[in-house]
Structure formats: structure tokens, C-alpha cells
Image: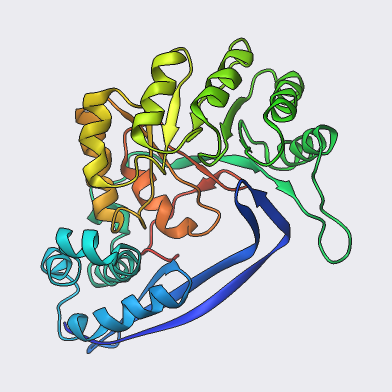
Amino acid sequence: MKITDVRWTPAFIPIESPLRYAFGAHPGFSRIIIEVQTDEGLVGLGECYGGSSREGQLAEMRPLLIGEDPMQLERIRWKLAAPSSLKLFGHVLGFAGLEFACLDLQGQILGKPVCEIIGGKFRDEIAFSAYLFYRYANDDGKGEISNQDQMVAFAKEVVKKYGFETLKYKNGVMPPDEEIETFIALRAAFPKLRIRLDPNAAWSVTTAVRVARRLHEYDVEYLEDPVWGMRAMARVNAKAPWITLASNMSVFAFEDLVPNAVMNILDVVLLDPHWYGGITRARLAGQLCEAMGVDVGMHTVERNSAFHRRPCCIWPHRCQILLQRRIRTTTTSLMT
């Protein structure tokens, strides 16, 4: 079987109301749907982040992929996305989407779910957690979340509706003291649920340590990327050793994994198949973390659930990803 063409279609997925984070707001999500066609009529589907730069990556890699056998994934990786190419030219996001499509083709060819191709299913269910954003009102004046009462009310609504057992509270939007009080209110409302914090590396080391001290008795599951950079994260870890630190920003590439373990920077690496160059590379990153005694979780999945679910099926770690419900893993190919 040979690849004969690669097509892609930009898509925009609107959401109920704009989600606020430390450096802006999301009115929706831009993605690119990728189709890899073969000479036997099969079409593999993939996906990557949207934007003209990603479309440019796909345009550059398209002629290199045509003529290749989708079963020869490692050959394709070294042809399109050798480590030096990823580091120097940043092709990782476009290549990940193509890898997803090739794995989908492999699943169709073999009649197997992708999780069986990459190691076998370790679990039948994946636990999802809620995402608590501050939000702007939409054009109809609805959906705003801008204070403690609104945040707690929204959390109660989604927990009741979907049965979440974990909440991720997005921070770095309001003043730290206000967000501390909101976390305390969430803990009072949900004494048995896991609750995480994520200010998207917007805080200073001093602020992060102060927040950790204020919340010491309130059972924070983990604090994700309170500050920017491995050195700053290591300082937070040294000054607030009681709190579990996680990252998908300061530690987010293969070359970060060993320094993280050697320097004792953080406790949980949040992997993302896109940023690690595909599902197979994310699986390898999880195994490296396992060997070094570092926990892993899955980065946010409101965007790409079909692709994020596959590594979660095979990792032996307690893997939670962010969406709105608990789902069953499927026994068909990648996209179904």
C-alpha cells in the first residue's frame, strides 16, 4: 500500500462562551482535519492545531509522504520529522497529525483498534475531569464566570450533570488572593473531589510559593505550571515541597524529561501526543517517565479526544484527561 495524496481542511469549533486564561481568551478552537489517501482506497484521518503555520508544515511534508507505505511509520518519522528537524524547524504539530492518520490506516489495514497496535489496552475506561475556566459572557449575555460564586455554581452544575470526580481550576486570570479564596470555596463545596490548579506559568516564584502555603491544608491534587521554566519550577519545588507539581509547559519535550528527573523539578509530566510528535512518541515518553519514577497524565483533551484516548488506554499510570464525562474505549480504528 502506498500513500497517494494528503488533504486537509481547517475547522473552527465554537464554544458556549469565551474561556479566559492568563494571556487571553479562547472564543473557540481552530483545528485542521487531515486526510491521508492510499492507492487501495483507504483514507486515514488525523488532526492538528489550526493556523497558517501548521498548514505550511503540511504543505512542506506532503510531497515527502506521498509514495510511502503507512505501515512504515518509523521510516516516515525519520524522513519527515527527524529530531533535528523538529528542534530546528518546529514540524512537530503537523507531523503528529500525519502520524495519527497513518495509525488510523494501520488500524484499518489490520482490522485492529489503534491501542492494540501500540501496545495493547490496559484499561476499559478513562476518567475525565472537569475544566473550570473564568469566562466572558457570550453575544447573548450568557455564560459569564467572573467571581467565586459563579465558579462554584458552575462546578456544581457540571459535577451533578456528568459525575466528575476531579476538577481543574484555571488560574492566572484574577488576582492570586481572589483565586485562593475561590479554591477554598471549591474545596468546601467538594470535600472529596480532587482539585487542581493551573495558572499557565503566569505567577512569579514568590507568588507560587505564597499560594502553595495558603492552600497547604486544602488538599491540592497538583499545581500545574505555576511559573515559567525548569529552574523556576525547581525553586518552587524546593520552597514548597509538600505540593505536587505538574507541567506541560516548562517540561514538554523529550529533551526535558531527563533534566526534569535529574534536577527533581516536578512530579507529574502532562503529555500531549501533538507536542511529542504523535501517539507512538507520547507512549515512549510515558515509558521514559516510568523508568525515572515520574508520574504522567494527559494534557487537555477538549480538542482532540479520539487521539488522546489511545495513549491513555495503554499507559499503566492513573491517567486522567480533561473533558466532560467518563467514556468507554472503543474496539474499532482510531476515529470511531
Where in the figure is residue 282, as x and y percent of width and height?
29, 49
- Image coordinates of residue 4 in percent, x first then y, are 23, 89
Q: How is the image coloured?
A: rainbow
Is residue 68 visible in the rendered image? The answer is yes
- Position of residue 61 in the picture relative to residue 189 (left or right): left
Name the residue located 33 percent from the left edge and 78 percent from the top edge. Answer: 58
Residue farthest toward the top in the current orientation of the protein: 217
Image label count: 0
> Quarter holding the C terminus?
bottom left
The N terminus sits in image quarter: bottom left
Residue drawn at x 28%, y 39% is: 286
**Where residue 164 sits: x, y (%)?**
64, 36
Which residue is pictured at 15% across the width and 70% down the height? 76
Residue 89 in the image: above or below residue 279: below
Q: Where is residue 182 shown, x and y percent of the image?
A: 74, 28
Q: Residue furthest right?
A: 141
Camera-side residue: 287 or 57?
Answer: 57
In the displayed structure, 76 sits above or below 226; it is below
User: In the visual, does 16 lie left or right of 140?
Assistant: left
Is residue 267 in sight in this rendering? no
Residue drawn 55% across the image and 39% down it: 202
Q: Is residue 109 above or below residue 252?
A: below
Residue 208 occupies which quadrant of the picture?
top right
Nearer the observer, 185 or 124: 185
